[in-house]
Image (tube, rainbow, N blue to C red):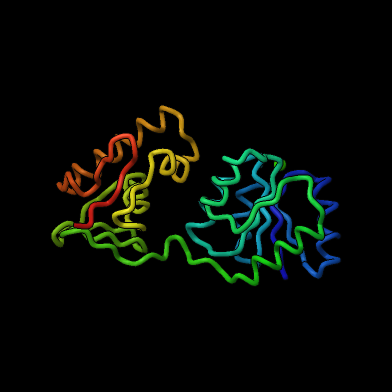
Amino acid sequence: MRVLLVEDDDRLAAALIPALARHGHQVVRAARADDALRLKDTCEFVLLDLGLPDLDGLEALRRLRRVSSVPVIVLTARTAERDVLRGLRSGADDYLAKPFRTAELAARMAAVMRRGSRPLATAGPVVEAGDVRIDLTTRQVEVAGAEVALTRREFDVLALLAREPGVVRSREEILDELWGDVRLSASRSLDVHVAGIRAKTGRPHLVQTLRATGYRLAVD
Ligand code: CA
């Protein structure tokens, strides 16, 4: 299979490319996230290092997931559980901590392929909440039939809640998924975006705040 290896470490890439070739894979290498995003459609599988020179790997993964459902295994020296969870939530199919054996990587790749492709995060349906219509594919929001212009971030927050209507998403989860960051500055910015959604839609109860828990999209 054609595999895109996104890895800035020349020595690791030089070792991995022939090793994967022995498992029958043809490897295309990208040393930077922007090259990876450019080359994504040429490959059937992506191996993604998180420490990249031009963009955090998790942000690269989020950008990739907006446009592609290609299987991704994250390869990283970061082993903190939080990073693993964040990586998987951002859309990785599996995760392997460095150093690893090529045989294990090849086995994990085969397991991911057997499971089949994941649904595209952006290919969601239209979600309706009262007279608010949220189209997750075209990123359009209508209130009582009239289109409302949200900012990109406001829409991201609304779409995240709309993917699971009625389900409470914690602040931390939202911040992790959209900002990759749970610091106070991002947290304040989330409040601003929620206020923006309420004001622009004129539906103050569309996004419900659950004190000390998080937010949810009101569907009733
Ligand atoms: Ca690296």
Q: In percent of the image, x 67 and y 40: which residue is there?
A: 79
Residue 126 lies, in percent from the top left, at: 30, 65
- Specify the quadrant that holds the C terminus: bottom left
Image quarter for ligand 1: top right
Using the image as rendered, state which of residue 73 and residue 39 is in the foreground.
73
**Toward which corner of the image does residue 188 lie, by quadrant?**
top left
Q: In percent of the image, x 71 and y 68: which residue is there?
A: 110
Using the image as rendered, state which of residue 21 and residue 174 is in the foreground.
174
Q: In percent of the image, x 50 and y 40: which residue is there?
A: 180
The total of numbered circles placed on residues is 0
In the depicted structure, whether residue 4 falls above or below residue 178: below
Using the image as rendered, state which of residue 71 and residue 138 is in the foreground.
71
- Specify the quadrant that holds the N terminus: bottom right
Q: In percent of the image, x 63 and y 38: which residue is there?
A: 80
In the depicted structure, whether residue 73 falls above or below residue 24: above
Residue 9 lies, in percent from the top left, at: 77, 43
Residue 56 lies, in percent from the top left, at: 59, 41
**Toward which corner of the image does residue 198 lie, by quadrant?**
top left
In the image, taking residue 54 as reference, residue 132 lies left or right, namely: left
Residue 93 lies, in percent from the top left, at: 60, 59
In the depicted structure, whether residue 24 falls above or below residue 74: below
In the depicted structure, whether residue 10 falls above or below residue 166: above
